Amino acid sequence: KTRYPVSQGFRTILMAGTTFFNFQAIQYLQLDQTVAIFFATPFIVSLLAGPILGEWVGMRRLLAIITGFIGVLIVTSPWDAYMHWAIIYSVAATLCLGVFNISTRWLTSKEGVNVTFTYTVVGGFVLLAWPAVEAWVWPKDIISWVALLMTGFFGGIGHYFYTCAHSLAPAPNIAPYMYSQLLLMALFGFIFFDDVPTVATLLGSSLIIGSGIYLFNREMKKQKTAPKGDA
């Protein structure tokens, strides 16, 4: 039983929103594009961690956040006449995920991991059942069944460990580990869907990853030594 039903419900809605918007996005965008935009999550987490969790960032890390945002702009290319409108889905998913990370950190500091995980799984199932039923198509072959089951299994396992991590470390420390997804998603996108990363995606991703690594290193140094001046 939770002591924070409203907060647990809010976190569940954020998780459902992240999943829904991301699934909408990958119908139209390349995998490397959606993941690159997702990499803006650490910057959202760093900005919100201060006022909500008391984990403030200094000027240098703020500049890194701005640099990462520039990288996101390069990937999304809002000035490009050929920008796909589905970019909006990825941006919405990223915003939901950023706030979701903050709420995860806050809740796991108040309640156990199992409580938070259970409420999210059950609540997420209830919220996402209606769009699934509305558009449901039975898998046509064994490969489709295996892919469907693997999505659920690895998604659940990953989410559990994700929640455990937030119970042990500050939110800004965990978010940069998302960057390992870029190589995997770009590789899988190329192998299974013949997606070749664009120059804009590669350039923007480099800025985003570089900024995220800098944020991670600054956070590690901040924990090892008492803050003096700018963090």
Image: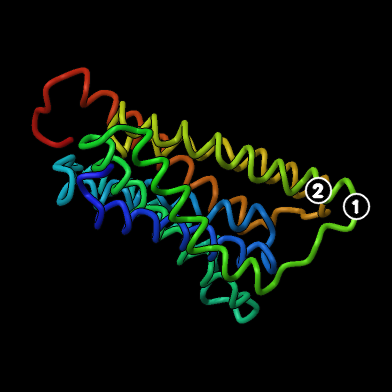
Q: Residue at x 53, y 58 (%)?
A: 19
Residue identified by numbered label 1 = 141
Amino acid type, callout 2: Trp
Q: Is residue 18 above or below residue 77?
A: above
Q: Residue at x 83, y 53 (%)?
A: 194
Q: Residue at x 18, y 35 (%)?
A: 231
Which part of the image, by quadrant, shows the N terminus? Answer: top left
Between residue 38 and residue 78, name the one nearer to us.
Answer: 38
How far from the left and from the top, in percent, is residue 10? Answer: 31, 59
Residue identified by numbered label 2 = 145
Whole-Å distance between the Cαs marked 2 and 1? 7 Å
Q: Is residue 143 above or below residue 10?
A: above
Relative side of 144 to 98, left or right: right
Relative side of 80 to 220, left or right: right
Local secondary structure at mark 2 = helix
Q: Is residue 33 above or below residue 148?
A: below
Dot 1 crowding, Cα within 10 Å, few <14, some 14–19, many 20+: few
CB within 8 Å, label 2 to label 1: yes
Q: Residue at x 80, y 61 (%)?
A: 138
How far from the left and from the top, in percent, is residue 79? Answer: 52, 77
Amino acid type, callout 1: Asp
How far from the left and from the top, in percent, is residue 65? Answer: 33, 50
